Image (spheres, coloured by chain):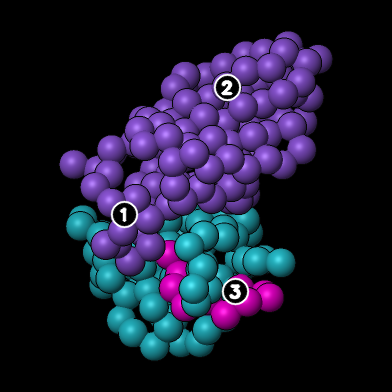
Amino acid sequence: EDQVTQSPEALRLQEGESSSLNCSYTVSGLRGLFWYRQDPGKGPEFLFTLYSAGEEKEKERLKATLTKKESFLHITAPKPEDSATYLCAVAHMDSNYQLIWGAGTKLIIKP
Amino acid sequence: GAVVSQHPSRVICKSGTSVKIECRSLDFQATTMFWYRQFPKQSLMLMATSNEGSKATYEQGVEKDKFLINHASLTLSTLTVTSAHPEDSSFYICSARGLLQETQYFGPGTRLLVL
């Protein structure tokens, strides 16, 4: 069964304290892995799409990496405005681009 | 680029009335649009998938007669909640993907409260 598991559920960091969020996935035929950021009361904001193991993408303080079993979202020297829920999702090769979602990691950056 | 809008952002209605939510792709043509529902502190739950000009495909457990979806053009999809009841109160979010795009881009969401 296709599945996405994110850890930890919640993460509290001090401003400037770097860390990583994990997204483990089980899917028979990966079309793509997606990272989104969601602020309370808003729709998810697209961050990255990764397609194959070894791929890496960066945007400001965020860097996403992909292996055959998991993806990491590395946050370097985070700021309070990086506080949000980070969602990971995968699309199966045979799906109509439908996404299988993880439960998310709530990130809180304290000043 | 890849902007998706939703209207209205918030709606309050009486039980038994119908509510229509619009989802528009502003700067690209949306081959496929998706409608989600999100409960507090939970992840997104896919309700239905619609391809332009075709009937929507509903997920198991979603009543197609209650949640009417229309994807009449490449930039507009609508979700109509018919005969709304308090249990339909939720946060509804649409997303869209363009031709040859893998990524879904999301709208800002609509908060529905049924009294």
Task: Report how far apart the C-alphas of labels 3 and 1 lie in the structure.
Answer: 26 Å
* Residue B32 magenta-highlighted: yes
* Residue B49 magenta-highlighted: no
Residue B115 in the figure: left or right of residue B84 = right
Sooner in the amino-acid sequence: mark 1 or mark 2: 2
Subunit ID for the residue under disc 3: B
Q: From the viewer's perspective, is residue A74 above or below residue B93?
A: above
Q: Closer to the camera: disc 3 or disc 1?
A: 1
Disc 2 and disc 3 in contact, CB within 8 angstroms: no
Tell me the amino acid under the disc marked 2. Answer: Ser
Kindly state the secondary structure of the residue where label 1 is placed: strand
Relative to the observer, which residue lies in front, B37 or A28? A28
* The N terminus of chain B - image quarter: bottom right
Which residue shows up at 72% across the image and 42% down it? Answer: A59
Residue A82 numbered tag: none
Tell me the amino acid under the disc marked 3. Answer: Arg
Please provide the residue range marked out in magenta: B25-34
Pointer 2 residue: A20
Task: Report how far apart the C-alphas of labels 2 and 3 lie in the structure.
Answer: 34 Å
Pointer 1 residue: A92
Chain (purple): A
Q: Position of residue A83 (x, y in %)?
A: 68, 28
Which residue shows up at 24% across the image and 47% down it? Answer: A28
